Image (cartoon, rainbow, N blue to C red):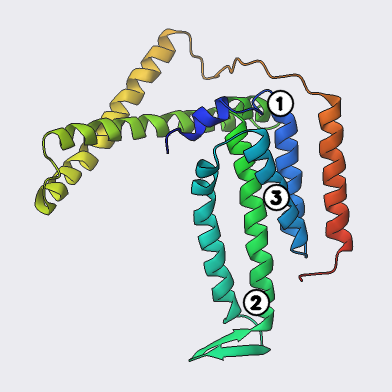
């Protein structure tokens, strides 16, 4: 991908929307979609989230599909597997594989639940910077949990950056010219990667301590204003979605 998720989260058209509103939309839509017994509720969640990502946030379609296609492949595999594994009523056979009605219905329902849930989570990931998520969650969760998550998030990128730097250095020295050399280079890379990353983390801790770090990470950010109009629209949508989930008949 040309841009990483963090770059997209900071440079999309919904960046100016209050993160509390986006978290509220994501949480309620995800819960309603997962507990719905009908495929139309998660399908609506998928369509609305996709619309917000592509047409309102203006995230490139290629990036969205790049993130969504592995989920679709997994959901299709689950659908096929459940079709010949679950239930008693046989609808047809292909050689020694028997497809059953109950499994097909459950597989279709789970397929749309996965689709709706992942697209909703992608909406939050692609439109909200992680620092704003931590800032909001810090008010509702223990600060120790948020501090650990924040440090994990930073060191994941440090680990990735160290890996790419070392791998590029090996490639410029023909470290992957053949299979034997590739295995040797990969072994050297993995043996030194965590050592280099650990040393880097120690330097970061020393620099934080020298600047007055006392075990409490202070997140400084300014959230956009929460507009009552947008809050009303989200609550109305969630109410209608929940109403559909309660009134529509199960499955298909």
Query: Residue at point 77% right, 57% down?
Result: 41
Query: Quick check: 94 left or right of 27?
Result: left
Q: CA distance from mark 2 to mark 1?
A: 40 Å
Query: Quick check: 185 left or right of 40?
Result: left
Badge 2 or badge 3: first in the primary sequence: 3
- Residue 25's image quarter? top right
- Callout 1 secondary element: loop
Query: Quick check: 77 left or right of 239?
Result: left
Query: Quick check: 74 left or right of 225?
Result: left
Query: Residue at point 76% right, 60% down?
Result: 40
Q: Quadrant of the C terminus?
A: bottom right
Q: Residue furthest top?
A: 211
Task: Kindly identify which residue carries mark 1.
Answer: 17
Residue 30 visible in rendering: no
Residue nearer the viewer, 56 or 92: 56
Badge 3 or badge 1: first in the primary sequence: 1
Q: Quadrant of the N terminus?
A: top left
> What x and y, as percent, mark residue 89?
68, 89
Query: Residue at point 59% right, 75% down?
Result: 82
Q: Nearer the viewer, mark 2 or mark 3?
A: 3
Residue nearer the viewer, 201 or 85: 85
Q: CA distance from mark 3 to mark 1?
A: 20 Å
- In the rendering, which numbered label is found on residue 104? 2
Decide: few, some or many residues near mark 2? Use Cα within 10 Å; few <14, some 14-19, many ≥20. Answer: many
Query: Residue at point 48% right, 13% down?
Result: 213
């Amino acid at each position: 991908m040309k841009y990483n998720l963090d770059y997209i989260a900071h440079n999309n058209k919904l960046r100016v929307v209050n993160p509390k509103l986006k978290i509220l939309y994501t949480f309620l839509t995800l819960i309603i979609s997962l507990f719905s017994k009908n495929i139309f509720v998660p399908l609506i969640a998928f369509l609305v989230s996709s619309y917000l990502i592509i047409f309102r946030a203006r995230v490139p379609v290629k990036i969205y599909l790049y993130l969504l296609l592995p989920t679709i492949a997994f959901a299709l595999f689950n659908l096929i597997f459940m079709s010949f594994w679950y239930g008693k009523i046989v609808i047809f056979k292909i050689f020694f594989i028997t497809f059953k009605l109950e499994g097909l219905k459950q597989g279709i329902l789970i397929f749309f639940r996965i689709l709706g849930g992942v697209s909703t989570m992608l909406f939050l990931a692609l439109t909200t910077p992680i620092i704003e998520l931590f800032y909001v969650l810090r008010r509702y969760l223990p600060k120790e949990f948020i501090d650990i998550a924040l440090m994990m998030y930073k060191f994941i990128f440090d680990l990735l950056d160290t890996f790419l730097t070392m791998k590029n250095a090996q490639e410029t020295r023909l470290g992957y010219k053949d299979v034997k050399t590739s295995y040797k280079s990969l072994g050297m890379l993995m043996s030194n990667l965590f050592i280099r990353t650990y040393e880097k983390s120690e330097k970061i801790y020393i620099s934080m301590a020298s600047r007055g770090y006392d075990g409490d990470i202070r997140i400084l950010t300014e959230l956009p204003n929460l507009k009552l109009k947008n809050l009303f629209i989200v609550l109305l949508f969630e109410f209608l979605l929940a109403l559909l989930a309660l009134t529509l008949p199960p499955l298909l």
